[in-house]
Image (cartoon, rainbow, N blue to C red):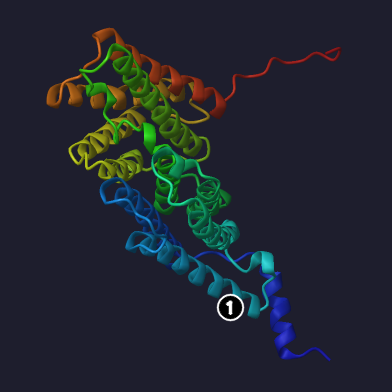
Amino acid sequence: MVTVRELTRELIRDQGPITPTRRFEWTVVALCTWLMAGAYLDAWAHRHLARLETFFTPWHGVLYSGIFAILIFLGVRALRNQGRGHRLDQALPAGYNLSLVGAVLFGIGGVIDMFWHLRFGIEVNLAALISPPHLLLMLAGTLIVAGPLRAAWRRPVSEAPWTAVISASLLLSMFTFFNQFDQPLVDTYATATSGAPATVAQLQELGILGIMVQTALLTGVVLYLLGRFTLPFGSITLLVGLNGALLGTLEQNFDLIPVAIIGGLLADLVMLWLKPGPKRVVALRVGAFLGPVGVSALYLLFLELTRGIGWPISLWLGSIAVSGAIGVLLSYLTVHPPLPALDAAG
């Protein structure tokens, strides 16, 4: 004899995957923002405070409390839905299972990181960014913050919801967190004007590489979004502005944060004008060139007016052109050139 509870579970299973509510998605976005803010706050502390010799710091507290909050929120929701009869793989809305996996993985990585510090000490500078435990935390964090973006990707919508845009912004910020050693908003290498010739040359190389890498990361995320969605006006402003605010605080380059926001606004205006997308390939490629050129040009122009650029004109104009070229090349990964028709013999 089938009980009422068993019948209810069967009916729930027939309903298929759970649809996330707006409250659920915005809660996840808020918790992911908490997590990312904690990560950048911890990075700021390592840069500006006396050498941190212990794992147990207030900055780690903010970071790991954010992880704990995400784990509790998603874990309780999954257990509740499973108790109502949903299968384990459908206990969370589509796209969020990996966020829960990431939260668990982050906790495991945190324990590994603690023992790593006890054994090898507290890493500093570049070693702190690419140590194996921290790379594991990067992977876990990427799985977590991309949840709202994955969820929106699977829904039959053409315009990206703001939860997906913020998720993409946090995803970009996760990438740039581990690239902060060569970020234009963190270290303004273009303003270096003195030192031994070899040192100046190395700083020029770091400055140009920083612009190239940031262009690739930023443009890659934007083009990834455009390959699936149309973006509401202000999306790139939010994406670049949020990322710029996090990066700008690391070395307290607060004057560069408005530059990032204005650069994002210019890119939004270009998108509004061109309306790029997979069906407007020429517009996509033009936008992929103009967007990076505008952002990098604005950045270098601001440095020239406020701090002075130590590069020769050919160097900084060339770096602007290279950033545009990187954008165009990345656009070919978003939309491939059409394949030729093959005859029967081919």
Q: Residue under circle 1?
A: 80
Quadrant where the N terminus sits is bottom right
Which residue is the extreme one toward the top? 314
Q: Position of residue 75 (x, y in %)?
A: 55, 71
Q: Position of residue 299 (x, y in %)?
A: 25, 27
Q: In the rendered view, would you say 38 is above or below 317?
A: below
Foreground residue among 41 and 15: 41
Residue in the picture at 29% in, 42% down:
241
Question: Is residue 107 something one can see in this rendering?
Answer: yes
Residue 250 picture quarter: top left
Count every numbered label the image shows and give the total.
1
Residue 13 picture quarter: bottom right
**Hey, what amino acid is under mark 1?**
Arg
Q: Position of residue 57 (x, y in %)?
A: 35, 62
Q: Position of residue 109 (x, y in %)?
A: 55, 57
Residue 202 picture quarter: top left
Q: Secondary structure at mark 1?
A: helix
